[in-house]
Amino acid sequence: REKEREREMLGVWRVATREIFRGAPRGFRYQSQSAIPEGREKAMEQDRKMGSIVPHMEFFDAYANAPISRYRVMDQNGEISPGAEDPKVGKEMAVKMYKDMVRLHIMDGYLYDVQRQGRISFYMTNYGEEASHVGSAAALDSHDTVYGQYRESGVLMWRGFTIQQFMDQCYSNKDDVGKGRQMPVHYGSDKLCFQTISSPLSTQIPQATGYAYALKHSGSQNCVICYFGDGAASEGDFHAALNAAATLEAPVIFFCRNNQYAISTEVQEQYRGDGIASRGTGYGIEAIRVDGNDIWAVYNATKAARRTVVEE
Amino acid sequence: PAAAAPVRARRGPAPARAGKEILLWEALREATDEEMERDPTVLVMGEDVGHYGGSYKVTYDLYKKFGEMRLLDTPIAENGFLGMGVGAAMTGLRPIVEGMNMGFLLLAFNQISNNCGMLHYTSGGQYKVPMVVRGPGGVGRQLGAEHSQRLESYFQSIPGVQLVACSTPRNAKALLKAAIRSDNPVIFFEHVLLYNVKGEVGGADEVQCLERAEVVRPGTDISIFTYSRMRYVVQQAVQTLVEKGYDPEVIDLVSLKPFDLETISQSIKKTHKVLIVEECMRTGGIGSSLSAIINEKYMEDLDCEVVRLSSQDVPTSYAYELEAATIVQADQVVDAVDKMCTGQKVAVGAF
């Protein structure tokens, strides 16, 4: 069968080359791939990657497979579920994680009220997503670069951005690290490896790919994590960035915070595929779906993802 | 004799009645409503325009009347849904594409430039693109650099598109109606801070010419050309100028591409002095194009060089004082007119 296929391909190429050179100037000789042994090998390999040739027509059913399962470690009582991996972070880290989540929640409460009172012009709360921020931040190295969208304050808090610094940015005063130039919640801290937030959605995603590419180029042991929401994953920049990251094999973790809404647009109106996780296969990127309210699951998954991107 | 009824903030738009005063966003909504009623091929597409009613309420509750296909909530992909709009327009529909903020339409520049603007030409006239691309732009109250873009200067070079900037409820409604009825692609600029301006509007049949400028205040001393929110800044300056004894003529350009040269030249022939007050950046702004045209065509009618007051060529900061320092303020307009009418030089930026 291999021989047969090879003959088939050579036949096609011979015809092709004849067609092309009908109009070619005299003396011009085209070296087709099939004419050189290395070319033939390469062509055979490419053909093998393409899947078998079948005579019956079959459309691949987009919904044939069950939706990607959701990884959860903690049960409703806060205990480790049977069969799940206990992250064993130790008491000190667990207490810090808890404190940061609660502090974030309380800070949100204040700043939300302050915005409604007109004392700052804008604010985005992080309600419900605290575990996804702190769990992932805790699993990373402090020098892993973070590209965020605008709802990742927990990551900054974990890394040591003080309440004063959060306030300075929101109030846009002279102590603001960003020098009063950006809207509230558009934090940035070079020291904490957290890139300054930019308002338009998804602009951070191709930048994350670029940064990761540069890290790889320099042989660094750090990686990039890029956060974005379910709505932002519809933007063209998302697709371009993931595709590029896959072809470049760049050390970047793409972290989608799917809270099922983009302002008023529900996910049913945003996409029809199996969430954002299913898109990974299309690009050749490994994907996992995690319960974002479960800090242990987020921690475990981020740690494993980091290991993969840094080592491979 | 009973106590006055408690004042409640109005939930939806005011009911339609010609000659009454409504807010600018309500005027835009009325225009959209009337045109969608009149012509079943008109539809709106954009982010959160359906159930949510639009981030500035321009399509408030319209989905209840016209259905979800005609008030289409798109996924978040500006380049995608601008392209969708072009495709829909090529089949004969009349889409109104809303950018939640004009700045986001930069993602869609390719579609607006290469397709929306050029398809009528490149297809040899076989296809029309009767689209309206609209949305809020301009410098708001502390919205940060990316939300304060003024796209009129970026778009003005695109061949094949018309640029229109509304400024009052009356012209907003009449111009939007005209833009929807037009067979050409029109980019319709609204300003974030003008949505709550109150004014009278016309009836269902009032449409305004898309290529005509508006004479806001006739005068004899100097021609002040402006558009969008700067019209109000100029009017504020005019109050002071009138007290000082000046008689400025204020013209709202409205049509940013093409310029209404008839109205513009008539004004210049009368006053012989031109001051352009705009909110876009100095470099490559609407004023720079207008200034060049006036220079080429009406040099004999000018007593002094054309002066442009524009925003500074910096990203718009968030902090209140920084933001205010980058855009034109009324006292700068007063100062410029003062100097121009007394033969002095007006200090302008480095470029």
Image (cartoon, helix red, strand yellow):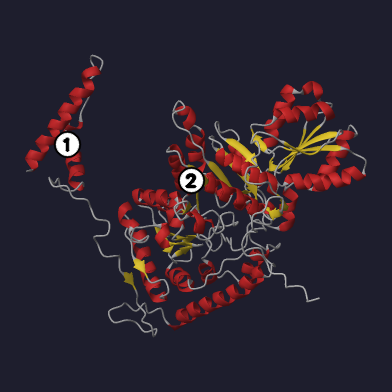
Q: Say which chain tag 1 marks.
A: A
Measured from the top left, where is residue B81 in percent x and y?
A: 46, 47
Query: A142 or A258: nearer the eye?
Result: A258
Q: Nearer the viewer, residue B7 or B290?
A: B7
**Quick one: quadrant of the C terminus of chain A?**
bottom left
Q: Secondary structure at mark 2?
A: loop
- Residue found 42% across the figure and 56% down from its top: A220
Q: Which residue is mark 1?
A: A40
Which of discs 1 and 2 lies nearer the camera? The answer is 2
Q: Who is closer to the viewer here, A42 or A150?
A: A150
Label 2 sits on residue: B40
Q: Amino acid at mark 2?
A: Pro
* Quadrant in the rendering for residue A297: bottom left
Image point (20%, 35%), residue name: A39
- Disc 1 crowd rating (10 Å Cα; few below 14, some 14-19, many 20+) is some
Q: Which mark is residue B249?
A: none
Give the amino acid at mark 1.
Arg
Residue A127's spot in the image, x, y percent?
52, 72
The chain under label 2 reads B
How many labels sit on residues? 2
- Picture coordinates of residue B148 (x, y %)? 63, 50
Residue B104 visible, this orientation: yes
User: Is residue B108 rendered to the left or right of residue A296?
Assistant: right
Q: Is residue A245 above or below residue A127?
A: above
Residue A264: image x %, image y %?
A: 50, 62
Q: Nearer the viewer, residue A85 or B59?
A: B59
Q: Quadrant of residue A169?
A: bottom right
The reply, left or right, for residue B339 in relation to residue A90 is right
